[in-house]
Image (cartoon, helix red, strand yellow):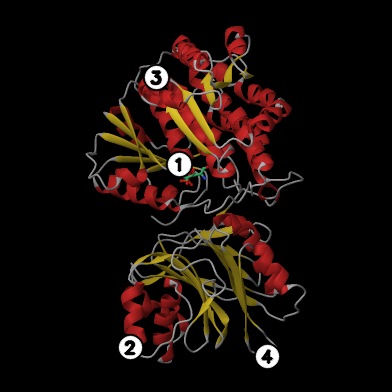
Amino acid sequence: MCGIIGYIGYRDVVPVLIQGLEQLEYRGYDSAGIACLDSRKGNLFLAKEKGKLAALKEKIGDFNIDSHIGVGHTRWATHGEPSRENAHPHTDFSGQIALVHNGIVENYATLKKTLQKKKVRFTSQTDTEVGVQVIGRFYKKKTSLFQAVKQAIPQLRGFFAFVLFSKDDPETIIAYKRSNPLVIGLGQGENFVASDVTALLSYTRRVIYLEDEDIAVLTRNKVTVYSLKRHSWVSRPVTTVNWNVAQAQKQGFPHFMLKEMYEQPEVLRNILSKRIDRQGEVYFDTITKAFRKRLKKIERVFMISCGTAYHAGLVGGTAIQQYARVPYQAQVSSEFRYTNPMVGPEDLVVLVTQSGETADTLAALREAKSKGALVLAIVNVVGSTIAREADSVIYTHAGPEIGVASTKAYVAQLATLLLLAFYMGRLRRKLSRDAHRTLIREFKKIPDQAAKILKEHKRFESCAKKHYTRRNFLFLGRGYNFPTALEGALKLKEISYAHAHGYAAGEMKHGPIALIDHEQPVICIAPDSLTYEKMISNIQEICARDGIVIAIGTEGRKDLEKMADDFFCIPKTSEVFSPILTVIPLQFFSYQMAVLNGRDVDQPRNLAKSVTVE
Ligand code: AGP
């Protein structure tokens, strides 16, 4: 959480920082700030405001400042309330160093006390200010900024990334990474550093992903990297990213979320064309022979992730169990890591993550690796920490997802995990060539079927209009669509702030049925499936108690349509593919509910896209 950026070069730094922060704002929007060095006066120019970037932009206005070096920040508050005082950048006691920070300095309280005893004054409640003050103490002793950072870092516990510069040294930006992401953008006569690549795309696609304990020294013409782990200067590979600026812009849509929902058919088409070879077999370019050998023999699968990605993991685990006949267990990352999990070399741990930076999922990965499990990451953001640390990675190729509510990344995760299940099924000889061929044939229809559902958007809108003032929703599903119920409920609460609960439909009579009355909307996800009739019985039970039924089913299901107050249909498909389709009406419903309630769809309150703190 929090987005940080730094620039050194020939351009006016303020627009570069502001534009970069616009791209990073999804990481947090409690406050925003920039610091740069005024070339004419040699002063540090500092501007920060509480609230969204718009407030900072308004404050800066047309302020003309001649500066070519600076740092910027967009905050998701951890230590200290969202306020101007707590907004970054923070400076040290001498006012020389300006620093932006993403993450947490865990021992900040102790360090602060020690510094206060030495008469260092603090102006904020943040852990960040402690970080910059510690660096400032070392800098005072006439070392270079790089040396000061190098000496200060071992005193700071926690997981964080810093970007900083000093008034004294207008030719250098320093960046440090421990666990939280930092990517360097390489230009001609200019260099950039940011929390993620979307902030750099307008300027360069040549990047270096920093590793943990790297200190990068950026000048206009050079980037050098020192590894605190290796105690030496190191060379890090330069990667060319294949995302482009347009993908990270709204392109005429009112919200990123809406744009990303409409991109889903294309994302699915792209995945299928990348992952299915001419013979109709699934293939993953990143899976090596050695990995495949182990994959063939694994005895259990653990699907570990957070939020929406966890729901994708549930679908993926079910498919792996069905087609590859390996038992699976799904757990949220924050629980997995603290339960001393019994995983070992015979187990596959699959981490699903859009950002590839989620702190709990990263910790789960490290836990699994330390126990010798085979670790596979299903990741969207190329070069992210989880992608780099896993034994193997399969990219989901959804393109940049900016809306905090995950949509296209989710369907990309679903599609990728289903392909993985079929791949494992073939590898382990549990899925015949013919059955596989039939599945792939059907899978190839899914992108067009998704596009067909998107055309129904007016109907989702009118349904949301009927219900947008309601505060409680129940989502029910079974089998492959129990995770859809969880996902539908999560989507609705995160962007509309209505309370929503996802439940396994079979569990309804064990408690939630008490909620049903004439005012309770129940969203029933009931496409054709093994448990369709059971679902129908559950819906009957809701109708008998006067509940409001909003049903999602397969086209032609007149029985379901009759029972429901609102009915949305998906084209005919096998149960295994249905979660890719059934989620689309739910995304639309949530989107409309949020819009009608006047919510900030792309930046819902209290949330951040990439959760890099525990
Ligand atoms: C999705 O709409 C959420 N914003 C959230 O649950 C998200 O899926 C979760 O934080 C996991 O993120 P990741 O995929 O980047 O690991």
> Which is more N-terminal, label 3 or label 1?
1
> Which is more N-terminal, label 3 or label 4?
4
Q: Which residue is mark 1?
A: 307
Q: Foreground mark, 4 or 3?
A: 3
Label 1: state its secondary structure.
helix
> Which is more N-terminal, label 1 or label 2?
2
Q: Foreground mark, 2 or 3?
A: 3
* Disc number for residue 506: 3
Q: Which residue is mark 4?
A: 41
Q: Residue at x 44, y 56 (%)?
A: 612
Q: Residue at x 58, y 60 (%)?
A: 29
- Identify the amino acid type marked 3: Gly
Label 3: state its secondary structure.
helix
> Which is more N-terminal, label 2 or label 4?
4
Cα distance in 3D space between marks 2 and 1:
43 Å
- Identify the amino acid type marked 1: Gly
- Identify the amino acid type marked 4: Lys
Q: Is residue 275 above or below residue 151?
A: above
* Disc number for residue 117: 2
